[in-house]
Every structure is written in structure tokens, then in C-alpha cells.
Amino acid sequence: MQFAPLYPLLHRLLKPTFPDCLWTGDAATKSIALTFDDGPHPTYTPQLLKVLDQYQIPASFFWLGACVERAPDLARAIWQRGDWIGLHGYQHYSFTQLSLSEVQQSLLRTQSAIAQACDLDLATVHQTIRDVRPPNGIFTPQILRSLQQWNYRPVMWSVVPEDWVRPGIAVTTQRVLQQTQNGSLIVLHDGYHGGADVAETVACIVPALLAQGYQFVTIDDFWQCRQQNSSQQQCLNHST
């Protein structure tokens, strides 16, 4: 059973309930973020990178630590491209299936894998690679509080075409194009589930979205814009 029609409704319900998560960018601009979960994959991710290179657009990748360890050279290449990197856990276990200590260790282990693969200082990785998307999008208020206490930033989504069940490239493309709007945060997959179609899907949606005037940015751009908007709002509140 496919749940794709439910995700827009879930987004509308969950976004105001959990405002500390990053759900979207700025609705006042035509900036959107293209994000990929479950990689890096030794076959599917290089195919995807060729498409991204063709259109010269940035992306944000939420990696599994185990996959980073299996493809360290690929992880390093993506890092050197300048794409934004986030964490998806060491293995694809829903955080609700783990104890809080196990969740923390999963994230720390993934950061260690990234540091080793990309030849980075681990302390720097702890400070800079701290965006977390919970596997399967499942979390609890307690998990979110813990992520923030551990200095992580929870990242969610607004456009989920359910590409991991492989409904077909045309269907996935149609769902993305129908749902995308200003500030959309799009989730696709370049891992074992859904990754076989990801390059061709992106080759369909990117030119269509560019033709509509959208600009592709990273998750970090969304965070920076959110911080700026918050600062501006605080200034307005102080002046009234």
C-alpha cells in the first residue's frame, strides 16, 4: 500500500506541532532544496551526480554511516563537490526502535565514518555535520529534545513522492511537480530502495522546476534564511 497522498496532510499537521524542525524554506522566495537519503550508493549515487553536474545544482545528502564506510571514496568526492551533508543514522533503523543512547551512538558513529572517509577532523565534523533526518521520518518529542541537547538540527520534509517503493519515474516526477512550491524541501532516495530510478527522476524534475523559475539551494541555506527571518522578526517585535 502506498501512502504518498497522506504526506502533504501529515506535513500540514506536523509542521506547526514541531516548529523546531526544519520543514521548509522561505515561502516568499522561489528557493527549493533537493535532498537525498540512504546513500552513498556505489552505483546509483554516481549516476545521480552526473545529472546534478549537468545542471550545476547543489544538493543535500543524508548519509547512513554504514554506506559511507562501504564507499569512502565516493563520500569524499561528494564532500569535495561542496554538496551539503547530513546524518541519517548509522543503519536505517527508526530512532523509535532504539534507546536514546543508541540513537546518539548511531549519529556519532556516522560522524566518525564521515570524518575518516573525507579526511576531516572529527571535532570539525561534530560542529558542522549535524543536520539529522530521522529514518522513515519517525520521531517522538523526546527524540527531538535529545537531538537538540546533543547539538543536532532536526530536518524533515515537505515533498515526499514515496520514490522508495518505485511507483515509476513518471509517477514520482508528477508528484514532485504537483507538490513543489516556494520553499519546498524535497526528499528522494539514492540508496538501495528507490536509488535505481533516482538519476532519471532528477533528470526529469530538475529542468521542469528550473523552467518554473525555481532556484536550488542546500539545507544550510534554509537554516540561514530561517535564522535571518527570526532575527528580523525579533527586531520588529522590539520596535513595536
Image (cartoon, helix red, strand yellow):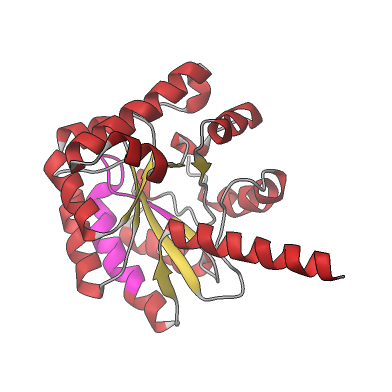
Q: Specify the quadrant of the image occupied by residue 72.
A: top left
Residue 21 drawn at (x, y percent): 59, 46
Residue in front for this viewpoint, 143 or 111:
111
Image quarter where the C terminus lies is bottom right
Above or below 236: residue 198: above
Q: Magenta residues? A: 187-206
Give the side of residue 187 with respect to residue 40, left or right: right
The stretch drawn in magenta includes residue 193: yes
Which residue sits at x=30%, y=62%?
Answer: 201
Which residue sits at x=46%, y=28%?
Answer: 94
Which residue sits at x=26%, y=54%?
Answer: 197
Q: Specify the quadrant of the image occupied by residue 60.
A: bottom left
Residue 63 drawn at (x, y percent): 32, 41
Give the side of residue 71 with respect to residue 137, left or right: left
Residue 4 drawn at (x, y percent): 51, 50
Residue 182 drawn at (x, y percent): 55, 71
The stretch drawn in magenta includes residue 9: no
Which residue sits at x=67%, y=53%?
Answer: 12
